[in-house]
Image (cartoon, rainbow, N blue to C red):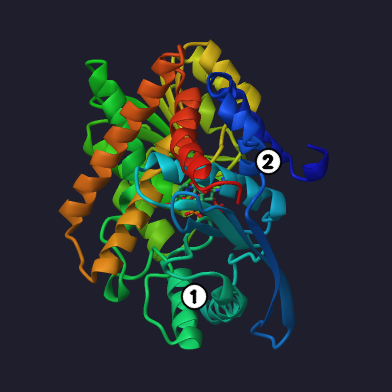
Amino acid sequence: KAKNAEQPEFIQAVTEVLQSLEPVIEAHPEYEQAALLERIVEPERVIMFRVPWVDDNGKIQVNRGFRVQFNSAIGPYKGGLRLHPSVNLGIIKFLGFEQIFKNSLTTLPMGGGKGGCDFDPKGKSDMEVMRFCQAFMTELFRHIGADTDVPAGDIGTGAREIGYMFGQYKKIKNVFEGVLTGKGLSFGGSLARTEATGYGLVYLVEEYLKCNGDSFDGKTVCISGSGNVAIYATQKAQQLGAKVVTVSDSTGWVYDPAGIDVALLKQVKEVERGRLTEYAARREGVEYHEGRGVWVTPCDIALPCATQNEVHMEDVENLVKNGCKILAEGANMPTTLEATEYVQEHGIVFFPGKAANAGGVATSGLEMSQNSERLSWTFEEVDAKLKGIMVSIFHAIDDAAKRYGHEGNYVMGANIAGFEKVANAMMAQGIV
Ligand code: NDP
């Protein structure tokens, strides 16, 4: 802890994983002998770099870029690039650490990594975003490659940014290869990648419901966020017969008692890059509230899809009071540690992000396969593979929790199932 004192999110993520792994370490003294835990919490490599670019007024801006190559035991490093002013080393390390286990759960051969920059794309012109992306890639290119490290999108990094970064990589390296995922369809992107995280989240919960003789049909769902994950979780949940009544952004939230109008939400957020105030202004019967507060709304299923530590104690107290049955994390670590413990103790079934939102990286893995084959699969093929992966993730975490005597504890199940494969690979590869 002392070594990482300035990295609270990283310490939070490691604490949760290590607590879950206690019974595994007890059952496998050889892991302790091989200092497996000490090794797994230390990134294989951390890269920090200067990103200088010129804004529209001719002024030079300097940002700080990061790539944390955390663990390559089971495949090339893989994980998104976050562009947000809050980005710092601790946040990238927390995300990279989580990514190791998430990628392992997908059953695909991908190691764990994460990167990003404290650049804020909000309010920047298209040309500024392009110049920034080019400057960022001008350093990053030397550390990545289709068989080394394959970054993807994350908060602030969508199709536009991936396109600019890919263009710059190709220009510098003179190689057309699947070095980034989330690419445009005309240059190696995969159908269904845009939908994958939100759809995958809903597929995982659907499988749990199915195993308990239930379904999404007729359920009321609360979602936070209104970005990529939130939009497609809303769409799929409603396709399965649920009613999604909330979405949010960092300034406020919407209560739409008739169920979110996905077409309007996509128009406002994806096409116009606007705010939720504009959604509320264009639709009858919608309430808009400033600030945070989604979780005061009664629901059967809560799907936080905005950002880390957005669900606090008072939120989960409200969820429990209002009879919520399931909380599945679309975002990475949206629920604080104490709130996670509270929901588990109060009968809400809890699915951690590393299992519930793994559909995005799983489909990125499918994009890598298509790039290697130089083939493109249909939307239906990718969607069916995604669904199969989410169903298998549910059963893997359910089974791991049962094997260690913690049936229904999907935090433990996900950490254990994700860890086992990486641990075996690290043991086989020696002390490196
Ligand atoms: P986007 O940038 O598309 O959307 C993020 C959404 O969350 C926006 O609506 C944003 O509002 C809101 N938000 C951001 N910060 C806050 C905050 N502090 N309080 C309230 N709302 C906030 O990101 P994604 O949808 O891609 O990602 C959301 C989460 O899911 C992240 O944790 C990400 O790491 C995780 N994730 C994403 C994957 C993907 O495939 N996209 C895969 C796996 C995980 P505003 O517009 O005001 O900033």
Q: Residues within 10 Å of mark 1 (few under 14, many from 20)?
A: many
Residue 267 visible in this rendered orientation of the protein: yes
Q: Using the image, determine if residue 92 lies above or below residue 428.
A: below
Q: What kind of element bears circle 1? A: helix
User: Which quadrant of the rendered structure holds the N terminus?
Assistant: top right
Q: Position of residue 155 (x, y in %)?
A: 53, 55
Residue at 31% across, 27% down: 395
Earlier in the chain: of badge 2 and badge 1, it is 2
Give coordinates of residue 331: x percent, y percent: 50, 42
Q: Which amino acid type is marked by label 2?
A: Glu
Left or right of 48 on screen, residue 17: left
Query: Residue 391 falls in which quadrant of the image?
Result: top left
Dot 1 beta carbon under 8 Å from ligand 1: no
| Disc 2 element | helix
Q: Say above or below: 293 vs 380.
A: above
- Report the Cα–Cα distance between label 2 and label 1: 28 Å
The residue to which callout 1 is attached is 165
The disc at residue 9 is: 2
Direction from residue 185 to residue 425 in the image, left or right: right
Question: Would residue 360 appear left or right of 188 to someone viewing this image?
Answer: right
Quadrant of the rendered structure where residue 123 is? bottom right
- Residue beneath the point at 83% across and 39% down: 2
**Which is nearer the eye, 207 or 71?**
71
